[in-house]
């Protein structure tokens, strides 16, 4: 029977949490960086995001964030633009919801960005407009059925 030489399994790695709850300093964009909102996750450490400069880019989640910081559709992220590929970018940082609200309050994000609802797709818009109608029965009606 083989000896276990490691320090533990995947549950040990899962238990490591870098204390995400504590407050961190708000990071603003620099040259070669842009704010973006995630449109959809593509898998394989990639996502599609709409940048503030109205360019849709394919973003690659860097290894330091991969499987540690979970990114979902609608999240506000900071991406590093590539000099040689304009349609691709690298995810540098994911903003927490309170940090995204602060960025919007400081005027870094435009007013038309929706922060906490996520992305409204065409399917969601259909559901809002013409929903199903429900018929209410009274107790007497149920007995007849």
Image: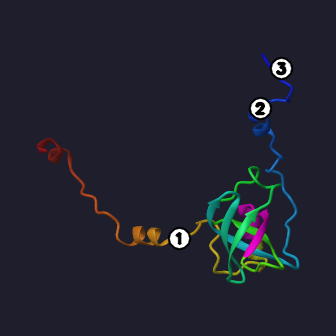
Q: Is residue 100 magenta?
A: yes
Magenta part of the chain: 88-102
The numbered disc on residue 76 is none
Q: Residue at left 80%, top 43%?
A: 17
Q: Residue 70 at x, y = what percent?
A: 70, 54
The numbered disc on residue 120 is 1
Q: Is residue 72 magenta?
A: no
Q: Earlier in the sequence, mark 3 or mark 1?
A: 3
Give the spatial CA distance, label 3 vs label 1: 53 Å
Q: Identify the element where label 2 is drawn.
A: loop
Q: Tell me if residue 13 can be seen.
A: yes
**In front of the other: label 1 or label 2?**
2
Q: Identify the element where label 1 is drawn.
A: loop
Q: Residue at left 81%, top 40%?
A: 16
Residue 64 image-quadrant placement: bottom right
Q: Which residue is mark 3?
A: 3
Residue 138 shown left or right of residue 59 in the figure: left
Residue 22 shown left or right of residue 122 in the figure: right
Residue 79 shown left or right of residue 127 in the figure: right
Q: Which residue is mark 2?
A: 9
Mark 3 touches mark 1? (CB < 8 Å): no
Q: Residue 133 at x, y = what percent?
A: 28, 63
**In front of the other: label 3 or label 1?**
3
In the image, is residue 144 above or below residue 40?
A: above
As rendered, which of 42 and 53 lies closer to the eye?
42
In the image, is residue 65 above or below residue 33?
A: above
């Amino acid at each position: 029977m083989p000896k276990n030489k490691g320090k533990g399994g995947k549950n040990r790695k899962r238990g490591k949490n870098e204390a995400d709850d504590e407050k961190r300093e708000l990071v603003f964009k620099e040259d070669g960086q842009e704010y973006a909102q995630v449109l959809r996750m593509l898998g394989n450490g990639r996502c599609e995001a709409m940048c503030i400069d109205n360019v849709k880019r394919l973003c690659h989640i860097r290894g330091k964030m991969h499987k540690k910081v979970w990114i979902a559709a609608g999240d506000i992220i900071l991406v590093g633009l590539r000099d040689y590929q304009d349609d691709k970018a690298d995810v540098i940082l994911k903003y927490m919801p309170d940090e995204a609200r602060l960025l919007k309050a400081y005027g870094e994000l435009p007013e038309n960005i929706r922060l906490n609802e996520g992305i409204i797709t065409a399917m969601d818009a259909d559901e809002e407009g013409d929903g199903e109608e429900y018929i209410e029965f009274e107790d007497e009606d149920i007995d007849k059925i």
